[in-house]
Amino acid sequence: MNEVMKQSISDNIDTITKRWVEQMKDNSSERFLDLMPASVVETTSREFTTLMTSNLSHREKVDKERLDEFTEKIIHFGWSIKFINRAIDTFSAVVYELFFETGVLTNSNLRQGMDIFSSWINPLRESIIEEYATKWEQTDSLQKIALQELSASLIPVFEKISVMPLVGTIDTERAKLIMENLLEGVVKQRAEVVLLDITGVPVVDTMVAHHIIQAADAVRLVGAKCMLVGIRPEIAQTIVTLGINLTDFSTTSTLRRGMQEALQMTGRTIVEEE
Amino acid sequence: MKMRIPILKLKDTLIVSIQVELDDQTALQFQEDLLDQLHKTSARGVVIDLTPIDFIDSFIAKVLGDVIHMTSLMGAKVVITGIQPSVAITLIELGIRLENVKTALDLENGLEKLTRELEA
Amino acid sequence: MEHGSSIEINTEWDIVAARQLGRNEAKETGFGTVDQARITTAISELARNIYLYAGKGVIKIEPVRAGQRAGLIITASDEGPGITDLQKVMEDGFTTSGGLGAGMPGVKRLMDDFRVETEVGIGTTITATKWLH
């Protein structure tokens, strides 16, 4: 009976694909089907239906390579897991309907047909979702690495003075990275004063403040001085409201004023030319 | 296997470069030796260079802190130099802040800092 | 487990041996200098605790693999008196030996996972894991 089903599907693959697309469009809020060019929708849908039928003749064996390729593609297109689930449901419904129309399924063999049907669709659904999850995790960790590479470099501005501009939210993992870059940089650049510029940090809560204080402490241990600059009014407010103690620090509102102080600390001033 | 950490005298400063991994006995011996030398030479300043040291645990940190405290009780100033980034991070994460400790990037900076401190 | 090593802690010298072993294992696993220092320090703290409070015990250092992550597990076990007040021991600054009281909470901060199993009169086993990022 598997073979009959398989034959029937491959005979009607065009109809299945067409109906599938229509039904997906009808009850879908995903933008994929509306936004993508018709040709892409066409090939992707075809690939999807082909993939869905690939394991019908020899059950339980899903074509790994094709699955791999396809999953990567749909992640790229931004299919959500919900969308994939519905795609599979819709596909089953379309095929089920078609089997009745073509007489592959009748009332008498319904039970046997349903068995084959479920042992065919379910493992497929599992493999697709599993593959999707794995791929997504990979993408996620790649993005994390990319973000880490973006963040926190120490810039030697003058002799003995370096600046680290911090941009974006600081979580524990990033804080560790910032600390390492900061200290390695201080030692390498032989900085005596480092300015930590938090102008670009949207929120300074107790945790972020804690990380900043730790970083400044560590900077002191390696033999330099850390200044916190770029403290916006709202940040100053939260710091005081939360009762965070930054009194051990020199802090200034702007990088410019911080730089002037840093120059003073290292025994220099900016002089205007006559 | 007992090691002694050499303590050098340069004018009125004692210079210590810790080159080996400190075990507990060596650390305690060093504490004793340094205080002895301070007493004998009446040096006014001490620079302890930790550049080759790649880790400090809470015990060694405590000995160091004690040494610094005792030294200042005897009227001398201490500058610690060359703490490696990895060591600084580990100390901070352990919760050891070594407050009131003067530090410098390397021995040279440390000697300069000490001279300034002693002049002040 | 690929390989791993363990060392008995009986004397102060074994603390030094344990952390040297730890540093080598950390290097071999591919940890950077900062993590090497974290792992070495954690081992030193754990080994010292065994020496100070239980007299003797074992430090085990083993590479682990979980899915795509690799790391190092340190297990410190002894048959000492056990810890009566675990909550107190995990507080910063609490010490019964005149130390800095940084050991236990410090190790927890240095490592990624940290677990203590202890029973008074039976002994203590501490497991701490560091993952490669």
Image (spheres, coloured by chain):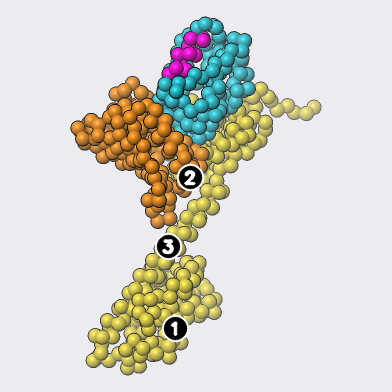
Chain colours: A yellow, B cyan, C orange
- Disc 2 to disc 1, how far (Cα)? 54 Å
- Asked whether A9 or A20 is in front, the reply is A9
In the rendered image, which quarter contains the N terminus of chain A?
bottom left
Q: Which residues are magenta?
A: B26-38
Residue that numbered label 3 is attached to? A134
Element type at marker 1?
helix
Whether residue B34 appears in magenta in the rendering, the answer is: yes
Task: Check chain identity for marks 3 and 1: say if they share one.
Answer: yes
- Chain label for disc 2: C
Of labels 3 and 1, earlier in sequence is: 1
Describe the element under mark 2 as helix, strand or loop. helix
Which image quadrant is residue B25 in? top left
Residue occupied by mark 2 = C28
Instruction: Return the x and y of residue B17 as percentages of the image width and height.
Output: 55, 22
Amino acid found under the numbered disc labelled 2: Glu
Q: Residue at x 38, y 66 (%)?
A: A130
Does C105 appear above or below A39? above
- Please state which amino acid type lies under the numbered disc 1: Thr
Is C80 located above or below residue A90 in the figure? above
Which label was assigned to residue A30? none
Query: Is C75 in front, or is C95?
Result: C75
Specify the farthest residue to the bottom. A103
Q: Could you tell me the amino acid type at mark 3?
A: Thr
